[in-house]
Amino acid sequence: MQPGPDPSQRIARIASHLHPPTSQMEEISLLMRSNCRAKGGAPGFKVAILGAAGGIGQPLAMLMKMNPLVSVLHLYDVVNSPGVTADISHMNTGAVVRGFLGQAQLENALTGMDLVVIPAGVPRKPGMTRDDLFNINAGIVRTLCEGIAKCCPRAVVNLISNPVNSTVPIAAEVFKKAGTYDPKRLLGVTTLDVVRANTFVAEVLGLDPREVNVPVIGGHAGVTILPLLSQVTPPCSFTPEEVTYLTDRIQNGGTEVVEAKAGAGSATLSMAYAAAKFADACLRGLRGDAGVVECAFVASQVTELPFFASKVQLGRGGVEEIFALGPLNEFERGGLEKAKKELAESIQKGISFVNK
């Protein structure tokens, strides 16, 4: 009977999951990144969450730790990521969790990742203008995407950081400058709009929201969010009053949560759920599952705008097909024109931020 692994080696291996090496010598002395798997862990994909200690990042990290398609989960933030990592790592699921703290560890967090999910950014605070918020979050997204371009240029990127209508164009410009841009692998996450639409429509119809599917096109803010209530599955009809009520509520769902929390936060839990749902769809696409269709804000030619949210089919390369909008009624055509006007300004604002 051969002796088992030395206990100190086992302890070092576990420690390396939680506290990644900060130098090359530590990298050599601890478990190599490519072998960072829990004993008995199922094979799967390597996923990084950038902004994992935030209001969205923490519940998102928990949900991704529960996903059986994830084998390695990297949690990065500029504060508090060691604590979140320790907490999440105690869950007895197959994914190995490793934490990364601060800019110096960003490259280690990103190397070898298949999927990168970015909820990083700051919420709007009292006295802060929308331009203040944009400039802070835009700078954060630019820095993180520069790391992605260097360390995992073939990863699928799910961008959550607001304003999505501008941060996706920012990411695209960063990747273009680095020579790594693949429009099929950059997706703005608008799933929360679909989740809300499915829920609110199901309430009106008296159905299980899991059985309802509402396409939501355009963008991810205010009037740019356009639910296509004429294309709801299962097929149904609404009165003009219901259409107005539902469209307004879907477009202003974020405000509804902010007001209900009375200054204590925004839509973090539902956003984490939606982000995990969309990330799972991307992983199933990467696995090669057929018929994985979600709405997302992507580089698109379905309108004259360079980016637009609509139904896309996900596959091994990210976005495999972008579907046409389909027939729109008069109300939706009017909404589309309003959405495009605001979207054009937001997209240009993101492009100008990188190229100024």
Image: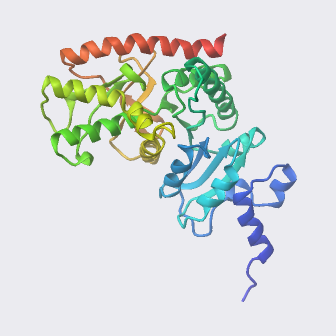
Indicate left or right for 155 with 307 as reference: right
Residue found at the very far right of the displayed protein: 25
Q: Is residue 334 above or below residue 276?
A: above
Indicate left or right for 151 with 293 as reference: right
Indicate left or right for 52 with 252 as reference: right
Q: Is residue 46 above or below residue 313?
A: below
Residue 90's quadrant in the figure? Answer: bottom right
Residue located at (20% from left, 37% from top): 233
Residue located at (26% from left, 34% from top): 214
Residue 153's quadrant in the figure? Answer: top right
Picture coordinates of residue 235, whole percent (x, y): 14, 35
Picture coordinates of residue 309, whole percent (x, y): 39, 25
Picture coordinates of residue 275, whole percent (x, y): 46, 42
Q: Is residue 230 visible?
A: no
Q: Pick whichever, 205 or 169, lies toward us.
A: 205
Q: Is residue 283 above or below residue 1?
A: above
Picture coordinates of residue 262, whole percent (x, y): 46, 38
Q: Is residue 306 above or below residue 96?
A: above
Looking at the rendering, in which quadrant would you find the N terminus?
A: bottom right
Residue located at (47% from left, 58% from top): 68
Q: Pick whichever, 3 or 147, lies toward us.
A: 147
Q: Pick whichever, 301 or 200, lies toward us.
A: 200
Looking at the rendering, in which quadrant would you find the C terminus?
A: top right
Residue found at the very far front of the displayed protein: 262
Q: Is residue 24 visible?
A: yes
Residue located at (56% from left, 38% from top): 119
**Tell me, what colour scheme is on the image?**
rainbow
The mark tally for this picture is 0
Q: Pick whichever, 136 or 343, lies toward us.
A: 136
